Image (spheres, helix red, strand yellow):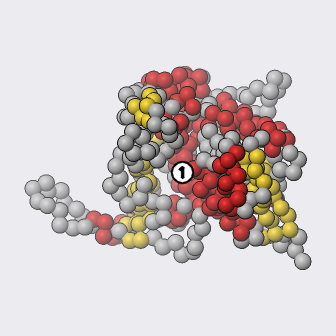
Amino acid sequence: MADTRVLRIAMNGITGRMGYRQHLLRSILPIRAQGGIVLDDGTRLTVEPVLVGRNAAKLEAIALEHGVEEWTTDLDGVLEDPSIDIVFDASMTSLRAATLAKAMRAGKHVFTEKPTAETLTEALELARIRQEVGVTAGVVHDKLYLPGLVKLRRLVDEGFFGRILSLRGEFGYWVFEGEHQSAQRPSWNYRAEDGGGMTTDMYCHWNYVLEGIVGPVRSVASRSVTHIPTRWDEAGREYEATADDAAYGVFELETPAGDPVIAQINSSWAVRVHRDELVEFQVDGTHGSAVAGLTRCVAQHRSHTPKPVWNPDLPVTESFRDQWSEVPANEEIDNGFKLQWEEFLRDVAAGRDHRFGLLSAARGVQLAELGLLSSAERRTVDVPELAVHAAAHDDHVVAPDAGDAGATGVGDRAAGAVAEVAR
C-alpha cells in the first residue's frame, strides 16, 4: 500500500477575495477533496489547510462552511508552529515581506501572491533569504496556467508566428467609485500608502506573462495615471485615491533568439469593456498572429490572411473576427491556480526549487518600480538584470549592477515617484 504524506498549509489572508476564492475554494479544498496528488514514487500527498487572518468571526464561518478544522488570528504563533509545513500569504502587500521573511527563517516553505514586497530591495532580500535557508518558494504566476495563454505559448513553441514582431495587451474594467454602487475591489487598492496602485499590482503580472510568452523585458516606457481621484471605502466614507488606477506601458522585449519585440499593454480600472474577455493579448509575427484571453485563443496564419483595403468612404462589409480560427486545447486544462498549487506541492515534496520563485517575483517588483520611475520622469528606462548574492558580513542585499544612472537607486527613486502619480 502506498504511503501517504500530509502537508499542513497555513493560509494567511484567507478572508480576502483572492485568498478565499482562488486559493482556498478553487485550489486547496479541491486538492483535498480529490485525495491529494500522487507523486512519481507512488506516495499520495494530501493537504490540510489552517486558516489565518485578523477577523475571527469570518475565519470561524469559513472553517465551519468548508469543514476546515483549524483557524487562528495568531500569525506569529503559526509561523513558529513546527507542525506547519507551508505558509501561504494573500494579505496586504505592505505586510507580505515581513511575513515571508519570518516564515522562511522558521524553515517554512512559502507560496505567495504578489507583489512579494513594496520595494525591489525587499523583494531581493526575500530571494536571498530563500537561497540562504534552502526552502522551496513559489510565487503565483496564475495567468501562465490559463487555457488561453497555454494555447498561446504552444503556438510560440511550435514556431507558428515565425519571427515575433509585437505583442499588444488590453486589461481592465470599470471599478465603481463606491458612492452609489459598491466597488468591486478593496479600497486599499487605491491608496499608495497601503501598497495600492495599478502599476504596482499589474506590472508584476505583466513581467512574468511577457517573460513566459516572448522573453525578458529590456526597457519600459510607462505612464501611470489616477483617472478617478475620489472614491468611497467599504464603510461608505469618501477618501482620496492616492494610487494610480491606470497604467499605459510600452516594453521592449528580447526573444531567446535575440530578436527585438515591442509590447504595448494598457491596464485600467477606469475603462469599460468592449472585447471578448477582461484581458486579451495579441501576438503578431511574420508567419501568423494570435489573440488569447483567459480561456480562448484564435489564430490567423499567413496563408489565410486576407488583403484588406482601406476605404473610409465605404462601410466595412467583411467580418474580420470570422477570419480567425479557434486554437483547440486538445486536453482538459484545470483551474490555473490549482494547477500551479499542485506543481508547487510536488516541488516541496521533492525538495527542489519551484520554477516561479522569489527572483522571478523580484523582477516583477523591479518592472513596477521602473514603470513608476518612467512615468515620473517621462522617459524610457532600461531594465537591468537581477542577481541574488549571499550577504558577506552585515546580512545586506547586494544591489544589482545597473548599467546607467537612470537605473541606479531605482528602489528609492520609484518609491518617491508613487507620490507624483499624474492626475
Q: Work out whether residue 82 can be spotted.
A: yes
Position of the C terminus, as image quadrant, is top left
Q: Is residue 340 visible?
A: no
Identify which residue, 175 or 139, lies in the foreground.
Answer: 175
Q: Residue at x 41, y 58 (%)?
A: 277
Identify which residue, 328 or 287, lies in the foreground.
Answer: 328
Q: In the rendering, at what x and y percent does residue 19 appear?
A: 63, 51
Position of the N terminus by quadrant: bottom right
- Horizontally, residue 25 falls left or right of residue 241, namely right
- Element carrying mark 1: helix
Q: Which residue lies under the disc numbered 1?
A: 209
Residue at image location 43% in from the left, 45% down from the top? 182
**Picture mark count:** 1
Q: Position of residue 78 (x, y in %)?
A: 81, 44
370 left or right of 348 in image? left
Find the residue positioned furthest to the left: 313
Packing grade of label 1 (10 A; few <14, some 14-19, many >=20) is: some
Residue under the point 45% across and 29% down: 239
Q: Residue at x 73, y 40 (%)?
A: 100
Q: Nearer the viewer, residue 273 or 154?
A: 273
The answer to whether 325 appears left or right of 209 in the picture is left
Q: Is residue 220 above or below residue 313?
A: above
Residue 61: image x %, image y %?
67, 54
Q: Is residue 162 left or right of residue 5?
A: left
Residue 333 is situated, as x and y percent measured from the top left of the image, at 58, 69
Task: Identify residue type, mark 1.
Answer: Val
**Camera-nearest residue between 92 and 5:** 92
